[in-house]
Image (cartoon, helix red, strand yellow):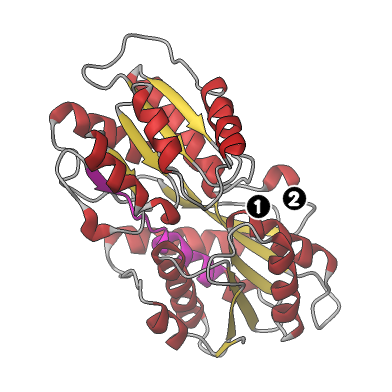
Amino acid sequence: MLKLLKSSVSAAILTGVLMSGALAGEVKSIAILTPEEGTDYGWNQQGIDAAKAAGKAAGVEVVVAQGLGYGDVRPTLRELASDGASLLIAHASGYNTSAPEIAKELKVPVAIVDTPAGLEKGLVADYTLSGHEGAYLAGRLAAKVSRSKSVGIVVSGEPPSWNSQSAAFAQGVKAENPEVKITYAVIGPAAYSDAAGGKRVTESVIASGADIIFGQGNGSSFGMLQAVETTKAADGGKVYFIDVIGDKSPIDKGFLLSSVVWNIEPVYAAMIADLKADTFGTKHYTIGLKDDSVKLLKTAAIPDNAWTEIQALREDVISGKIKVEPVYDAAAVRALMTSVAQ
C-alpha cells in the first residue's frame, strides 16, 4: 500500500503543471485528486482539464494526483497539503469523508462532491453538480429518434449527480412521448470503473428492446459503449449511446448519438475567487444550460430537424417556460421508470 501511495504521489507531483504568471494572492496552488486516470473522456478527464484551465486563468500552480482509486486518500491529501496546496479538490464521492477530516486537521481548504450540507466557511466547499437540464434535452432527443420506442438508462451507481440526470432524462422522454418505455439498470453500488459490468448490463438492457442507451459511468462507460457497438437492436439496426460529462467523439465508431457535456472550469474558477475573497465554503456551485457549462453534444447521428427542435426546447428551459427540477433521491428516480432491471 505504501509503495502504491508513493508511486501515486510521485506521479502526481511529476504531472503538476506550473502555470505562467504570478501566484494569485494567498492562493499559491491547487491540487485535484481523481480516482481514475484523466483519459476517460468523462468525470476524471473533465475535472483535470477544468482544474488546469482554471489554474492557468488565475496564474496558480495546478498539481494533478490521478488514478488514486476509491480507497483511503488521507495520506495523499496530507502530502499535497504539506507541499503547499492552497486548495485540495477531492474529485470523487468516495473522498467526501476523508477530505473534510484533513481540512480540519491541517487547516487546508478542500472541495468535495455529493455533500451539500457539508459547507464550512474557509475550509469545506461542496460542488455537487447536476447536468439535469442537459439530461432533460437528451431524453427528448432519445424519444424523438428511438425506432423501437424503448430506451435504457445504465448507471454505475446512484450518487446525486447521476440520479438527477437519470430523472431528468426520464422526464424528457415522457414529455416527448409518454408511450416510450424506459428501462433502468444499475451496474453496482459503486461500479464506476467496472467496464466489464457496464458491457454486461448494457447488453441486457438492449436485449429488453432499448435502441438508445443513456449511460452514466466514468470508466464503466467504455463497457457500455462497447456493448452498443457490438449488439444489434431488436430490429437488426444500430443501438445509439448518449454519454455524460465528456465528449467521446475522438473514439466514436458511429454509435455516439450525443453527450450531456459539463464544463467544470467556471466552478473551479469560482472556488479560487472565493478563496481570495474569503467566501470559500459559504455557497453552492451550479452548472447549467444558460452559460453553456452544460450543453448537449451535436453529432452527425442527430437528424437536423430533431436538433433544431432540441435547440428550441433548450431556449424554453433557459427562459423557465419548461422547468426541470433536480431529483436526487434514488427511490424517486426509480419511480419514474417503466421498469427497473434486477
Q: Residue at 62%, 62% (x, y): give it.
A: 242
Q: Nearer the viewer, residue 210 or 63?
A: 63
Q: Amino acid at mark 1?
A: Thr
Please state the horizontal and vertical placement of residue 20, each as a whole percent of the image: 42, 10
> Above or below — where is 38 with respect to 180?
above
- Please identify the quadrant where the N terminus is shown: top right
Q: What residue is pinned by disc 1?
A: 299
Q: Amino acid at mark 2?
A: Asp
Q: Residue at 16%, 38% (x, y): give it.
A: 122
> Above or below — where is 140 with respect to 223?
below
- Please identify the quadrant where the C terminus is shown: bottom right
For numbered disc 2, what is the local secondary structure? loop
Q: CA distance from mark 1 to mark 2?
A: 10 Å
Magenta range is 124-141
Q: Is residue 144 left or right of residue 210?
A: left
Please state the horizontal and vertical placement of residue 69, each as a whole percent of the image: 56, 48
Q: Which quadrant holds residue 10?
A: top right
Q: Is residue 315 left or right of residue 282?
A: right
Q: What residue is pinned by disc 2?
A: 252
For numbered disc 1, what is the local secondary structure? loop
Q: Is residue 100 left or right of residue 212?
A: left
Q: Which quadrant holds residue 106?
A: top left
